[in-house]
Image (cartoon, rainbow, N blue to C red):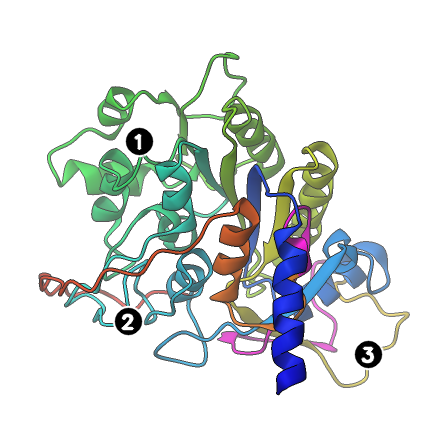
Amino acid sequence: MKRAVILFFVSLCLWADEPAAKNVILFLGDAGGIATLHAASIHAYGRPGQLFVQHMPAIALSDTSSASEWVSDSAAGMTAIVTGRKTNNGVLSQSDTAVRGKTDGVALKTILEYAEERGLSTGVVSNSPIASATPAACYAHVNDRSKIGEIFAQVLKPRFGDGVDVILGPGRAEIANGIQALGLDVDVELRKKGFRVDATLQPVPPETRRLAVLLDADDLDLEAATNTAVDVLSRNPNGYFLMVESDLHTDKLVRGLERAAAFDQIIRNVASRVSANTLVLFTADHSFDLRIAGKSPRTEPLISGAGAPSKSVVVLGHHSAEEVLVAAQGPGSSRVRGFLSNTDLFQIMLAAYGWSPEQPPSSTPAPAIVLNRPCDHF
């Protein structure tokens, strides 16, 4: 016991000597568990272990459970990563006292909000709808991930700073409808907040500091969007926080594996271009039950030329509870090691900046209106 305590304080001293990160980029592979990464490497390169994230300097495994279930959805999984607190499935950045669709929990301060409070620029980029669970957990606090209007309204009325500065992704129609139900026009309100608003991704003037690109279709060029976000956010001399998500669900097997390989290449390229004072962190919010099982000859491709999976590829179509990869490089990455909880990733990012966590508020939340909702696909 005494040895463990000594090692703990030695580690603290070593970490205290590390330079602080000016920037943090969190790459989030939605449903990008280890089995998906393994299959993506075989599919793209013909052999395992060829992905960049599998060779980053710091590697760990992370639990992904939520407060309510061993198998997390993206709302609870991302909440844990960006707030350091577990919550119930379906809830976005509220405490586990929230009851989905019925009662609010206490709002949990996110790493994006810490950055905003300290004058950094912030951004969210995704090839999923930008008000869906993973990006929304960074900037919104609601008891039900399906409340799109209420979610995106928090871009317009943030709790800290001037709110998220770069928003790039699909979901325009759903967001516009949700905001319209609140009596507002989304483009008008964004422009009032100083955003350059575009319906397509295109080059932006060098003076651009706030950018919203809301696409109608799910055809975001994620690499171009990520580079645009880095360019815009880098104009703030105080630094930035950026979250980039790619949907890696393999219920659509070919798309999932190809996206996983492409996302890995984006991470490789960004990691090579950003400054040495940037923490680059990759993880997944939860795993997915893809398996390579049974007799699976190495000579047989996982996917045939016609796009059909081989008999050795089994996809049951559900989230799963096993640990996921955490990989990192840059200031603070030495904390990424061993077995972690998903809540530890928030602490790692916060410590990389050199910031201390605040005590969560203890106020009792007011009850919310009960909404009827269909079951969502995680």
User: How many C-alpha atoms fall within 10 Å of the one at disc 1: few (<14), some, or many (≥20)?
Assistant: some
Q: Where is residue 118 in the image (x, y as percent from the top left)?
A: 39, 36
Circle 1 SS class: loop
Identify the disc placed on residue 296: 3
Does the image show residue 324?
no
Amino acid under label 2?
Asp
Q: Residue 162 has which mark?
A: 1
Q: In which quarter of the image is the N terminus?
A: bottom right
**First in sequence: mark 2 vs mark 3:** 2
Bounds of the magenta span?
A: 305-334
- Distance Cα–Cα, label 3 vs label 1: 53 Å
For the residues carrying marks 3 and 1, which lies nearer the camera in this image? 1
Using the image as rendered, state which of residue 182 and residue 56 is in the foreground.
56
**Residue at image location 52% in from the left, 32% down from the top:** 239
Q: Mark 2 points at which residue?
A: 96
In percent of the image, x 79 and y 57: which residue is there? 55
Q: How far apart are marks 2 and 3 (CA)?
A: 43 Å
Q: Which residue is drawn at 50% across and 63% down?
A: 285
Residue 307 on the magenta span:
yes
Percent x, y for residue 318? Answer: 49, 74
